[in-house]
Image (spheres, coloured by chain):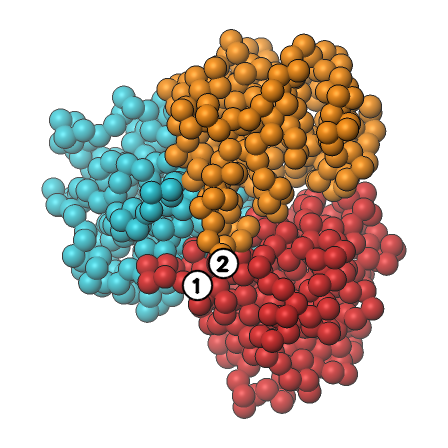
Chain colours: A red, B orange, C cyan
Amino acid sequence: MIKECIENVRKNAPLVHNITNYVTVNDVANVLLACGGSPIMSDDLEDVEEITSICGGLNINIGTLNRNTIPSMFLAGKKANELGHKVLLDPVGAGASKLRTDTAVKLMKEIKFNAIRGNISEIKTLALGSGSTKGVDADVADAITEASLDNTVAFVKVFAKKAGGIIAVTGATDLVTDGDKCYVIRNGRSEMGKITGTGCQLSGMMTAFLAANPENELEAVAAAVCTMGLAGEIGWSNMQPSDGNATYRNRIIDAIYNMDGETLEKGARYEVR
Amino acid sequence: MIKECIENVRKNAPLVHNITNYVTVNDVANVLLACGGSPIMSDDLEDVEEITSICGGLNINIGTLNRNTIPSMFLAGKKANELGHKVLLDPVGAGASKLRTDTAVKLMKEIKFNAIRGNISEIKTLALGSGSTKGVDADVADAITEASLDNTVAFVKVFAKKAGGIIAVTGATDLVTDGDKCYVIRNGRSEMGKITGTGCQLSGMMTAFLAANPENELEAVAAAVCTMGLAGEIGWSNMQPSDGNATYRNRIIDAIYNMDGETLEKGARYEVR
Amino acid sequence: MIKECIENVRKNAPLVHNITNYVTVNDVANVLLACGGSPIMSDDLEDVEEITSICGGLNINIGTLNRNTIPSMFLAGKKANELGHKVLLDPVGAGASKLRTDTAVKLMKEIKFNAIRGNISEIKTLALGSGSTKGVDADVADAITEASLDNTVAFVKVFAKKAGGIIAVTGATDLVTDGDKCYVIRNGRSEMGKITGTGCQLSGMMTAFLAANPENELEAVAAAVCTMGLAGEIGWSNMQPSDGNATYRNRIIDAIYNMDGETLEKGARYEVR
């Protein structure tokens, strides 16, 4: 199934509308192209409804939210809901400021998200209404360990039921759940945290996977997470001694560009709980 | 002549003012530096007139247009016109939304553009007043084929006359015309479409070529198109098996950085119709 | 001491709040991660006070300033001052437009900056109230030569006293002074000028060095300058014949990622005047 998910992205080439931050936007666009999708960015209130209408998915990322783009997120989200498009929320920095937390919570109230992807601190903030996100990174105290895994899986399942969509928590161990089943994914490398925006990139790619696999949302999201993690492993294996995080960034996107269904199926490391 | 065009960019190091989208802006800046120009970005209404005054060219790209930057485009464009600077329009996504189409059309009415560069769907939209742009990519139905080439050349020539400037249509085959002569350019590789912003990069570089070759606008634009396409070919020849679109992006800019007049002259593949 | 400065960044992993331009922001984020810091970008008036509160340093860069972000710079700067955080100003393009010059001057009046980093034309503009910045690059007439070095050191020392913070002038030769001592640094390569944003990157990294070395501001700023310059030298030594400025950009960030205290101490080339 994981295999079919990426093959469907390459086959259907979904157009993804991104309202996202200006920090990692270029990498989001290139990852979308690498996986077989097609990106378009548009965040003006007058533009977003029409642009989202011609797309198959909408990726809302609050990384550099502002007074102009927040209303656009709501407008685009409602339009995408109306049209039955897949919509994803990346609540960057929820828990780090009231504006970020409130905006994410309000977006969740007014828009139906097919999936929400964040680090554990961001997801805890959304689930509990407050949190302690360390900037845009997860708080160390929140990190998922083998000891806390069972509890975290249970917690995320409950939140997914309440949210009415898929929750993807990414970090050293990734969790993807619809409330019933939970994929526990162990692809990836810790060095990915030394590149800005691997989370944002994943959210963009995840939206393409959702749009290209409309009937298999849970598997689509899990497949996107496996793709990113496996690309991190493959990219790392191509590193030379003098390479660092800038080259690693390119190596990961390159690995996604070259990823085929077989490689993904063989390299995906997950269990379902 | 092609050779002299790039040599003049390196000799004159034109400063180019860019009001452009936040998706590909970094690559636009690095391409401008690679070809021998110098970039400056400024989009605030209070800033653009003065900034454009110290430049030799102005590149207006509507990729992520918004209520704040649209008025800046008009103001900067009029100032640049007044000063006799070269001005270029990249109508990203014209045809994909009313805001984009209307803004591009209105810009064309109020500002004299020395050149307009877009994909065939965007150019058709501007010529016909409406279109079917697939997001920021050309509609497959619009693609220039050998069969449709004669008709498309004729169509673009008519539009160039009407627009009063050079029209550059880029895609698998590129057309550059001032209404009389039309360069049909066959450099480039299809894989360039898997990188975000090669069109935006070309528009930035084209503005530098125009500014550095004020008396030879048609050749300057054609030379910029050949430079980008040839860089795509050279960059591809430097790719390793595990490389993908992220590395390819860098390889293309690197190839522009290393391009000299001789290489360009020898590698440029075009005919004039 | 230079050695300890970078080691403290890796040990303390300071979170740096950046209100910066959208051209080079991604590289700024990746450089901050490369040197051991952690970046967060936020520029909305409602968001910046809270975000800066959880950080150790604030990097204000006016490269693409606008009516929305300028008030945020003042608000964040005042909050950071109140909390005793390290605050840095990068006056990109001061001298190139009234908005840029006035904003930089007004920021200096209302906010206490621990350090200001710019090219010689930008710094002259701030010191003298007007200037002749060539876009975002220094005017050739302003370039520091061995002949003008003594005068420039004296001039910058006076300005540092007046400004009440460290002044870092970067170019072929770099000067870092608190008004008493002046580091004259000779690391780096001229090819770094062919990459967009090495100055912005340095400003981001410098803020992390300041935050991680609160008691040794002068050495911290000098160490950041040496790190960037040495990374430029190491990065260049890893270049292949077909590489250009795009790959060089990555090589420099990679070199920072791999830089340890020993390498920096051995490679730093400076004298104190």
Q: Relative to the observer, which residue lies in front, C132 or A51?
A: A51
Q: Are marks 2 and 1 in contact (CB under 8 Å)?
A: yes
**Pointer 2 chain:** B
Residue that badge 2 annotates: B242
Q: Residue at x 45, y 60 (%)?
A: A248
Q: Is residue B185 above or below residue C15?
A: above
Query: In screen coordinates, is C182 left or right of A194?
Result: left
- Left or right of A154 in this view: C118: left
Q: Quadrant of the N terminus of chain A?
A: bottom right
Instruction: Tell me, yes or no, if residue A256 can be seen here.
Output: yes
In the foreground, B6 or A158? B6
Could you say which is closer to the camera, residue C20 or residue C227? C227
Chain hosting mark 1: A
Position of C247 with respect to C8 (left or right) is right
Instruction: Tell me where residue C13 appears, x and y as whole percent.
Output: 38, 65
Residue designated by label 1: A238
Q: Nearer the viewer, residue C39 or A249?
A: A249
